[in-house]
């Protein structure tokens, strides 16, 4: 995390940040509860927006069922409760565009192709 990003981040669930970093680096899915729904997601990027941390990732399962279509979703890190790393591996999705302007100067870590 660079100095500029760390100063701009509001209080974050600090224990969850290393878990997200590990998921991105090792290409391992994360499980968590989000809006009272159990989700498994493939994290592709963690970044800041308005001082909050966000994770963009592909939802692999919602409440144990695959989604009707794969899409890249945005999750506020503070809203992902009971966040944990799973042994399930993933391949980077073509839906993720690392050069998207919304990540410019805000991305803390992105998945490598």
Image (tube, helix red, strand yellow):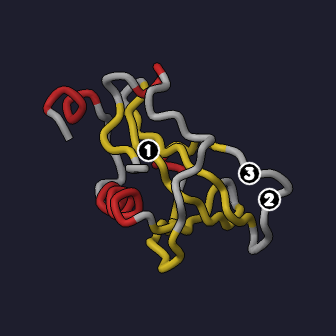
Whether residues under marks 2 and 3 lie with C-beta atoms below 8 angstroms apart, the answer is yes
| Residue at x 55% of width, y 68% of height | 31
- Residue 21, compared with residue 82, is above or below; it is above
Task: Return the x and y of residue 69 as percentages of the image width and height.
Answer: 81, 51
Figure label count: 3
What's the CA distance linking mark 2 and mark 3?
6 Å
Task: Return the x and y of residue 104 as percentages of the image width and height.
Answer: 37, 22
- Residue 17, compared with residue 2, is above or below; it is below
Residue on which disc 1 sits: 45
Q: Quadrant of residue 14?
A: bottom left
Front residue (pair 5, 97)? 97
Provide the secondary structure element on which disc 1 rests: strand
Quadrant the N terminus occupies: top left
Q: Quadrant of residue 65?
A: bottom right
Residue on which disc 3 sits: 70
Residue on which disc 2 sits: 67
What's the CA distance linking mark 1 and mark 2?
20 Å
- Residue 113, compared with residue 61, is above or below; it is above
Task: Return the x and y of residue 42 as percentages of the image width and height.
Answer: 55, 59
Q: Earlier in the sequence, mark 1 or mark 2?
A: 1
Binning the other alpha carbons within 10 Å of mark 2 as few (below 14), some (14 to 19) or many (20 upward) gives few
Task: Return the x and y of residue 88 as percentages of the image width and height.
Answer: 53, 76
Q: Earlier in the sequence, mark 1 or mark 3?
A: 1
The reply, left or right, for residue 15 in relation to residue 88 is left
């Amino acid at each position: 995390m660079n100095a500029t990003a760390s100063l701009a981040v509001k209080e974050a669930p600090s224990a969850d940040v290393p878990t997200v970093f590990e998921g991105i680096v090792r290409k391992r899915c994360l499980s968590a509860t989000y809006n009272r729904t159990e989700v498994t997601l493939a994290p592709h990027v963690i970044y800041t927006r308005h001082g909050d941390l966000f994770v963009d990732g592909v939802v692999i399962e919602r409440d144990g069922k695959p989604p009707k279509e794969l899409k890249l979703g945005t999750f506020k890190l503070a809203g992902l409760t009971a966040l944990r790393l799973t042994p399930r591996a993933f391949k980077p999705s073509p839906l993720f565009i690392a050069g998207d302007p919304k990540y410019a100067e805000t991305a803390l870590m992105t998945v490598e192709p």
